[in-house]
Amino acid sequence: MPRSGAEARRRLQQAALELYRERGFDQTTTAEIAARAGLNERTYFRHFADKREVLFDGQAELRDTLVHEVATAPEGRPLELLLHAFLKAKHILEGNRDFSEPRCAVIAATPALRERELAKAAALTEAVAGALRQRGVPERLAGLAAQAGWAAFQRAADEWINDPAQTLDAYLRRAFDDLGALSAAASQGSDGV
């Protein structure tokens, strides 16, 4: 059995997800995860810093892809840059659909994992805001756009996981269209104030 590399990492993730669903996050140890995967605990810690990180493995790749895509996107307004970036990064989620659905349920049921998810999202949105600032978007707007873009992405991902009848691409476009509609409605509403 492989003790390192992508296969061992995948097996550890699957074992953790299975155990978290069966026993709960708090009742599962890293030793049990490693044993379920046919590995030892030392191998577990070569791949993941703690038992929460096993469910957040793709976050660094997602962050790096989004930052790169914002930085290299054609000219556009902040939300256009973000839609471009999320469309380029969607393969990360699409490639892990079988893992993503049960992962969301485990996170929703576990306060420690929800807290980690919020911290990861904050770091990701700050990195994306930084990429927007590098493109000349003012500080205040860069942060707001990054947070709104992340919210739209989360909404699209949730809809896609709950109803795969449409593509993630379609859900992303609709979520960003909804953001645009909200922005237009707010602008029209403020004209009469």
Image (cartoon, helix red, strand yellow):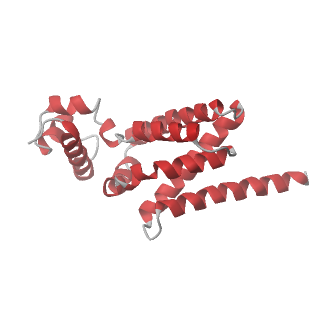
Which one is nearer the viewer's eye here, 96 or 69? Answer: 69
Q: Residue 100, how many percent across, how many down? A: 36, 53
The furthest residue to the left:
1
Q: Is residue 95 above or below residue 77?
A: below
Answer above or below: position of 128 versus 20.
above
Residue at (13, 45) in percent of width and height: 36
Residue nearest the viewer, comparing 179 with 169: 169
Q: Is residue 151 visible?
A: no
Label total for image:
0
> For this view, does 135 lie left or right of residue 41?
right
The residue at 44%/40% (across/down) is 117
| Residue 2 in view here | yes
Image quarter of residue 53: top left
Q: Is residue 54 left or right of residue 119?
A: left
> Where's residue 112, x and y in %?
38, 38
Instruction: Left or right? Give the position of 91 relative to 75.
Output: left
Q: In this view, which residue lies farthest toward the right?
A: 192
The spot of residue 88 in percent (x, y) is 49, 49
Q: Residue at x 51, y 37 (%)?
A: 68
Considering the image in quadrants, where does the N terminus appear?
top left
Locate residue 108, reporting x and y percent: 41, 50
Residue extending farthest bottom = 165
Question: Which of the 4 image quarters holds residue 46?
Answer: top left
Q: Is residue 162 above or below residue 49?
A: below
Q: Residue at 65% x, 42% y: name it.
A: 145
